Image (cartoon, coloured by chain):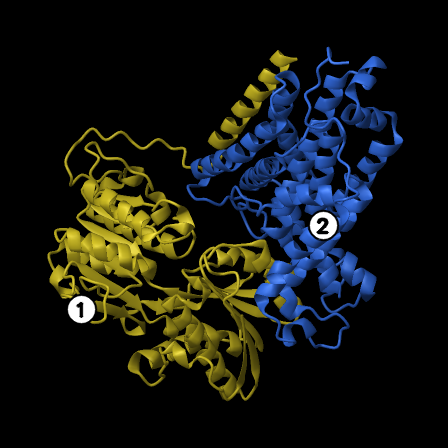
Amino acid sequence: MTFLIRQTLIYAVPLMIVALAGVFAERSGIINLALEGIMIFGAFIGVLFVNIVQEAGGFAGAKADGDWVALQGFALLAMLVAAAAGAVFSLLLSFASVNLKADQTIGGTALNLMAPALVLFFIRIIVNQNVLDMAMGDAPPWFMLRKTTLGFSRTDDLGFLGETFINQVYPATYVCILLFIVLSVILYKTRFGLRLRSCGENPQAADSLGINVYRMRYAGTTISGALAGMGGFVYALTTANCSANGDVAGFGFLALAVMIFGNWKPLNIAGAALLFGLFKCVAASYTSIDINGDGVCLLGEIGISVHLYRMMPYVITLVVLAFTSKKSRAPKAEGIPYDKGQR
Amino acid sequence: MKKLTAMLLAMAMALSLAACNSNPGGASSEPPANSQSGDADPANTPGGGESSGPVSDPNAIDDNPSTADGKYEIAMITDVGDLKDKSFNEGTWNGVKLYAANNGKTYKYYRPANGNEATDDDRYNAYVAAIEAGAKVIVAPGFLQAGAMRKAAAEHPEVNFVFIDGFPLTERDSQDDPGDVLANVAGIAFQEEQCGYLAGYAVVKEGFTKLGFSGGGGGDNPACCRYGYGYVQGANAAAAEMGVNVEMRYSWAYGSNYSPSPDLQSMMQGWYSGGTEIVFACGGGMFSSISAAAAANDGYVVGVDVDQSSQSDTVITSAMKGLEQSVNFALDKQFTGNWADISGTGTSLGAKDDAVGLPTATWSMTKFTVAEYETLLAGIKDGSVSVDADYANLEQSYSNLTLSVES
């Protein structure tokens, strides 16, 4: 059970934060199809930052002393760098769709096509292979919180909650969850959030009340880019041993699906991401999941084909989408370039 | 606003370029200008080592040398995975570079188009490109090369082919009408079951009782199959000597293209948190997913093909095969005029040729010592310890080992 929760969170959190990134853009009226591309770019810059800092000997002392607070600071710094990279990358989309009034779908697709190629190009220049790894060691000893890093011994039992939420977790996961909550509150409970949402529903009305629609849309897409970049790095850190290879296994597109599936609402998105994460985790490790702790891995022993488990996350997504899509309602003005003259 | 954005974008571009250049591990060094011409000149002699004796560090040799006339005598066609996979391709490539640097040959690698999804046509095109660029001998690791190599070798009898992890090829891929054996292909294979055996024996002697094996190639790669089967036999033999029972989980899942994936990492997380103590990561880039899971759970990993202990603290030992030695062996035959020795035959290198083993220089095991290892290795050499190579026998009943094969 502990294992299941831990792994589900690892899959769900990047999905959740990137889906929220999509919400910010779409609520301001810009369709951000480029989530996948921005994730790839953010992951690359984040990993590159870690690589360069390690190569220069930064935080080596903290690693040797087991100073996990400093190491978490390092992780946080890398997340910020990835977020900044994502934000800058997303400016391409904002510029094309706000200033040039270009078709947002095409702009986003262009970024999706460009990011993997660009990233692979740089990785090949830098390390002469297709994968950029950390400069030394594995991700967990650097960035993961474990019993031993907190001063407990390997055999201590921290109880169910402790084992699940303190042992073997990346604090980056919790940072993302916290950020998710804070940003959701901002979107719904502040003046800025209200204005942002109004620009996605009826920008003409918003403009007539003195809101600068262009600026709001820039803000929405930039926040979106920052979140997606950060999500990309968190994905690379937690599921790919902190390496970048110009691919995030379609998580950006999945995040788009999760966003639609969650009806552009943060709470529903969190639920959808957890559901998907759960099935993804079951698919990959069903032979090791022991739900009630009796040492029997039931799912592995009932003899259902492995392919069925691997299909499950996607089938479930389709099924839920089929039931929920009737009620789903996209922001009204999304995808339409704002034209002042059109009142 | 437009100007500001344009400026920001330009800055982002400039910054990312600057970041690349400042990376000390980068391949940013300019290839030294080569004013001389002619095939025999070494394209790049590293660090001015022209007179300083043999070069032994492959990383000091340039990966992308250029010659004035664009001709390269030794070509390597990569297998699936990256050139620098820290495993199979890299080991072969290091052999090529070392031989070339120490013998003044020109060399170049070719990566078939479409990366891991390369087809026989893509590989064939890489062969043609290599031959057009003046290759006299082509080194190609990986049994997947067979189809393309057969075609290229039949069309270009003047070029020799070293088929690492391979076998002799006939003119046609047909049981009934194979035609003649191609004399310009030399198959070099390894007795991986022997180093797998050594690794399995070592880890059980070291005190591990819950083992795992995660292999690449989906169970179709003969080399990985031999590794795995040897590993099982070695573990069983050690367990029988110690009078203990060991368990082993054995899987080919998520390994079909030898690359890391989130799914593989999840599955390995499951294994390690379910009690597995050590996993044999038998497939190039898969290593990274497995070592991440091991590091998270304080578990251990057995590396493959080359000594992987520098990559992760979780590596306790590696089942190595002498890729460098074998490349050196074959290229030496080529350039000293002894190609006939290996022409059209399959050469299988094993313990007796010192081509398989565990890394003794980075030994980290405490209960199983280097001396015990040497004894075991000697036993394999003189035949007193026999290791079965026929991996079709994998699923038998072992005296002291419970094998659970997962799909």
Under mark 1, the amino acid is Asp
Residue at the extreme front: A326
State which chain disc 2 sits on: A
Residue A251's spot in the image, x, y percent? 62, 45
State which chain disc 1 sits on: B
Residue B114's spot in the image, x, y percent? 39, 45
Q: Which chain is yellow?
A: B
Residue A149's spot in the image, x, y percent? 72, 56
Residue placed under numbered mark 1 in the picture: B177
**Dot 1: element:** loop
Residues at discs 2 and 1 in contact (Cβ within 8 Å) = no
Task: Identify the residue at image location x=32%, y=39%.
Answer: B64
Task: Identify the residue at image location x=65%, y=56%.
Answer: A315
Task: Identify the residue at image location x=55%, y=20%.
Answer: B10
Residue B55's spot in the image, x, y percent? 29, 48
Which color has been applied to chain A in this rendered view? blue
Quadrant in which the N terminus of chain B is drawn: top right
Under mark 2, the amino acid is Ala
* Residue A89 found in image quarter: top right
User: What whole-number distance in Å separates the C-alpha atoms at marks 2 and 1?
Assistant: 56 Å
Decide which of B144, B200 is in the foreground and name it. B144
* 2 vs 1, front mark: 2
